[in-house]
């Protein structure tokens, strides 16, 4: 019995997915992405599956955008329990899934699919994964906090913004392309009576950010700025202070420029490792209907460096 390191192809799921049934243990969970070779999800999920004594494994499947629809449709006949979705499939999957949670609809993205009675059910665990990570890192919640989400109209940012509203927070989203943030605000204000009028959409100019930070308690980076070692911070220098809480969703590589600014200002801060862990923990619970082995998954992830979901 061993965990496959192979990157499988979307067409391997066709004709009953024989190749996955022949593995020992058989593969019945996967991550779909393009690229997918460097994903950290298989070691994290396989550690959980071993601990839970499930006789199945989780593999990587390279699914190109044009293959996504058929790959999802083939999951059931290949006897899969579900799949994780990563770049570039999270948004495209919305139109291809039978049942989607209301939260995932507003988040505009699905990162988890569960197959039940031949139907595909779509979830988004990024928002709740962020909330669990935030509690773990800072021993506090988001209720009534003013929250600024940089890149809040992007995939991860939007999931976090919607979840912050659900948690009773007061989020603002700042976007390079402000019209995207305006659209998200309009959608939430129209579709979601309970949260209408709370979300603000801002531009990312120095003046706007400086003014917003005066009343902001929590700053979240959901832009990719910081993924490369020489990336600048999405925030101008000198705006953070010791009362701020800074969460950078980036988990690959070392300290980002934003985290360096936070440390310099004496602010509390954390990187996206804990969100990566908790979104995976929630996926396992969706597939198996029982609590996932959090510490086992944490150890499996900690042993990896410079990885992606
Ligand atoms: P995405 O959908 O492409 O969204 C990226 C957002 O960042 C958009 O709002 C985009 O604005 C903005 N942006 C891009 N480049 C920028 C720049 N140079 N300056 C300012 N804003 C910029 O990407 P995503 O999938 O949400 O991923 C975003 C980040 O979240 C990545 O770093 C990823 O590692 C992280 N993430 C972490 C986790 C975790 O579990 N820790 C999970 C998911 C994602 P425009 O729309 O104007 O282009």
Image (cartoon, helix red, strand yellow):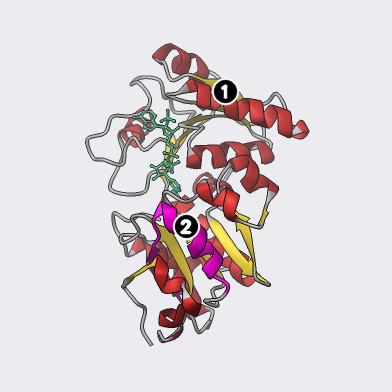
Q: Which residues are magenta?
A: 57-76
Viewer-nearest of discs 2 and 1: 2
Whether residue 128 is visible, yes or no, is no
Asked whether 65 falls inside the magenta stretch, the response is: yes
The percent position of residue 217, horizontal first and vertical second, equals 54, 28
What's the residue at 31%, 62% (across, down)? 37
Q: Which residue in the protein does label 1 denote?
A: 182
Q: Nearer the viewer, residue 71 or 206?
A: 71
Q: Is residue 161 above or below residue 123?
A: above
Instruction: Choose the circle earlier in sequence order: 2 or 1.
Output: 2
Disc 2 CB within 8 Å of nearest ligand 1 atom: no
Q: Residues within 10 Å of mark 1 (few under 14, many from 20)?
A: some
Asked whether 219 falls inside the magenta stretch, the response is: no
Q: CA distance from mark 2 to mark 1?
A: 29 Å
Q: Is residue 194 above or below residue 300?
A: above
What's the residue at 50%, 37% (across, down)? 157
SS at mark 2 in the image: helix
Picture quadrant of ligand 1: top left
Image quarter of residue 266: top left
What's the residue at 62%, 64% (across, down)? 286
The percent position of residue 8, horizontal first and vertical second, equals 36, 70
Residue reaching furthest to the right: 193
Q: Residues within 10 Å of mark 2 (few under 14, many from 20)?
A: many
Image quarter hosting the N terminus: bottom left
What's the residue at 45%, 23% (across, down)? 177
Image quarter hosting the C terminus: bottom left
The percent position of residue 114, horizontal first and vertical second, equals 60, 65
The percent position of residue 76, horizontal first and vertical second, equals 58, 72
Q: Which residue in the protein does label 2 denote?
A: 68
How many numbered dots are placed on residues in this image? 2
SS at mark 1 in the image: helix
């Amino acid at each position: 019995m061993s965990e496959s390191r192979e990157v499988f192809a979307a067409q391997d799921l066709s004709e009953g997915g024989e190749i996955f049934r022949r593995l020992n243990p058989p593969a019945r969970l996967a991550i779909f992405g393009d690229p997918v070779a460097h994903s950290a999800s298989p070691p994290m999920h396989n550690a959980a599956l071993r601990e839970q004594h499930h006789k199945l494994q989780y593999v990587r499947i390279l699914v190109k955008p044009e293959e996504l629809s058929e790959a999802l449709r083939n999951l059931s006949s290949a006897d899969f329990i579900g799949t994780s979705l990563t770049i570039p499939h999270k948004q495209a999957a919305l139109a291809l899934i039978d049942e989607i949670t209301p939260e995932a609809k507003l988040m505009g993205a699905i990162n988890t699919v569960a197959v039940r009675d031949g139907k595909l059910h779509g979830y988004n665990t990024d928002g709740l994964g962020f909330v669990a990570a935030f509690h773990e890192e800072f021993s506090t919640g988001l209720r009534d906090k003013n929250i600024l989400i940089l890149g809040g109209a992007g995939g991860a940012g939007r999931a976090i913004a919607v979840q912050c509203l659900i948690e009773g927070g007061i989020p603002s989203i700042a976007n390079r392309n402000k019209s995207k943030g305006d659209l998200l605000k309009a959608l939430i204000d129209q579709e979601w009576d309970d949260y209408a009028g709370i979300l603000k959409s801002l531009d990312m100019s120095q003046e706007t950010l400086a003014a917003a930070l005066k009343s902001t308690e929590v700053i979240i980076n959901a832009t990719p700025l910081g993924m490369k070692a020489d990336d600048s911070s999405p925030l101008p220098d000198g705006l953070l202070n010791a009362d701020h809480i800074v969460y950078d969703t980036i988990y690959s590589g070392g300290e980002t420029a934003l985290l360096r600014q936070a440390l310099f200002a004496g602010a509390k801060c954390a990187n996206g490792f804990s969100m990566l862990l908790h979104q995976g923990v929630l996926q396992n619970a969706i597939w198996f209907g029982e609590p996932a082995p959090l510490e086992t998954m944490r150890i499996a992830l900690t042993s990896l460096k410079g990885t992606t979901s």
